[in-house]
Image (spheres, grey):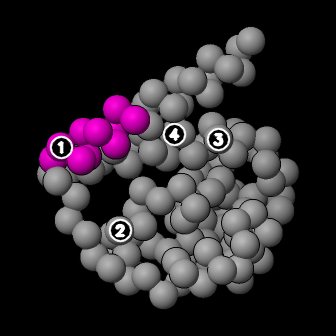
């Protein structure tokens, strides 16, 4: 399961970076850079259910994600602008732990690899 989680996370993160390419950092608004990361608003350790939730993960700069612990104050402001206050508050109150099964993780990996490829192929047109 840990190896499958790692593969699913890598595919998911790649998709998020492609989805958000060109958008500013969710937390501080700095213009897009190729080294942007997939940044979780609610950490997977606090709610494993939200680990692969597209509303919970957005492109952000390395500085905010790694050196400012996500810059959560700025992230929350940016997140409300993108998905609305009600959804943000719903995620903030969700502390549900979830055990991802092997088949679910394989399906997530396949799904996000496919979505990433579609985004890449669409960008080439």
- Write the residue at 43% across / 31% down: 113
Nearer the camera: disc 1 or disc 4: 1
Q: Is mark 4 in CB contact (under 8 Å) with mark 3?
A: no
Q: Is mark 1 in CB contact (under 8 Å) with mark 3?
A: no
Q: What's the magenta bit mostly, secondary-structure-wise? A: helix
Q: Residues within 10 Å of mark 3 (few under 14, many from 20)?
A: some
Query: Could you tell me if residue 64 is visible in this image?
Result: yes
Q: Position of residue 106 (x, y in %)?
A: 24, 39
Q: Give the answer, above or below, for where 104 lies relative to 82.
A: above
Question: What residue did someone put label 3 on?
Answer: 19
Nearer the camera: disc 4 or disc 3: 3
Q: In the rendered structure, does residue 108 fall within the stretch colored magenta? A: yes
Question: What residue did someone put label 4 on?
Answer: 14
At mark 1, the secondary structure is helix
- Part of the protein shown in magenta: 102-111
Calculate the distance from the C-alpha at mark 1 to the C-alpha at mark 4. Answer: 20 Å
Disc on res. 49: 2
At mark 2, the secondary structure is helix
Nearer the camera: disc 1 or disc 3: 1
Q: Position of residue 42 (x, y in %)?
A: 50, 75
Q: Give the answer, above or below, for where 117 lies relative to 40.
A: above
Of residues 99 and 67, the one drawn nearer to the viewer in this rendering: 99
Calculate the distance from the C-alpha at mark 1 to the C-alpha at mark 3. Answer: 25 Å
């Amino acid at each position: 399961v840990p190896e499958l989680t790692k593969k699913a996370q890598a595919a998911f993160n790649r998709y998020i970076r492609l989805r958000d390419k060109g958008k500013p950092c969710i937390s501080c608004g700095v213009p897009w850079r190729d080294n942007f990361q997939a940044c979780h608003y609610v950490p997977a350790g606090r709610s494993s259910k939200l680990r692969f939730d597209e509303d919970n993960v957005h492109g952000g700069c390395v500085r905010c994600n790694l050196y400012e612990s996500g810059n959560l104050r700025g992230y929350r402001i940016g997140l409300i602008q993108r998905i609305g206050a009600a959804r943000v508050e719903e995620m903030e109150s969700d502390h549900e732990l979830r055990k991802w099964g092997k088949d679910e993780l394989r399906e997530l990996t396949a799904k996000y690899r496919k979505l990433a490829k579609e985004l890449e192929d669409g960008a080439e047109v």
